[in-house]
Amino acid sequence: MSGRIKNKVEELERCMEELARIRPDTFDQYELDVKTKAACERYFEKVVENIVDIGFLVIKAENLPTPEEDKEAFSILDRASIIEPVLAKRLKEAKGMRNIIAHQYGEVDDELVFAAVKEELKHDAQAFILAIRKFMEKEK
């Protein structure tokens, strides 16, 4: 694995650990604690940003077509058989949610964000890391 990709994967793992540490157990706790909610949203953003960055680094390293927008990176990785189609779809959805949180494009659905922070993002980030590591091992 290239040094830059490895460093980004490690940064992603650190963000996931921090998110796991601050994430409350229940939605009620999440909803009532404004600071924790804001911190969870920020780590959600950081995790997704790291995933996108890794995707772009892999695309560049493999001389794949450059995406015109961030979400397209996941389709490119899917077409190159680096990630599975279901994961590509889920990561596109996470990127969309990240944009809503970061840019306040609309009403943030706290229950949806909490569900993503509690389980979905962890699962998808781990699947992404595994896929990237597996692909990079084959490239050696």
Image: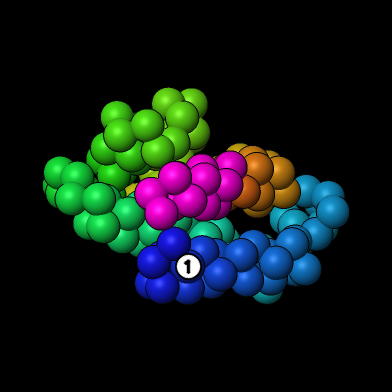
Image location of residue 82, percent across then percent down: 40, 38
Q: Residue at x 70, y 67 (%)?
A: 17
Residue 74 picture location, percent across and down: 34, 40
Which residue is tagged 1?
Answer: 6
Which picture quadrant has residue 37?
Answer: bottom right
116 with respect to 87 (left or right) = right
Assess disc 1: are there few (<14), some (14-19) or many (≥20) residues with their C-alpha within 10 Å of its C-alpha. some
Q: Residue at x 36, y 61 (%)?
A: 53
Task: Specify the quadrant of the image occupied by residue 30.
Answer: bottom right
Percent position of residue 41, x then y:
57, 61
Foreground: 107 or 70?
70
| Relative side of 53 to 31, left or right | left
Task: Name the residue nearer the viewer: 88 or 137.
Answer: 137
| Number of marks | 1
- Quadrant containing the N terminus is bottom left
Q: Residue at x 75, y 68 (%)?
A: 22
Left or right: residue 45 versus residue 37 is left
Magenta-colored stretch includes residue 133: yes
**Magenta segment boundaries in residue numbering:** 127-140
Above or below 49: residue 116:
above
Q: Which three-letter amino acid code belongs to the residue tagged 1?
A: Lys
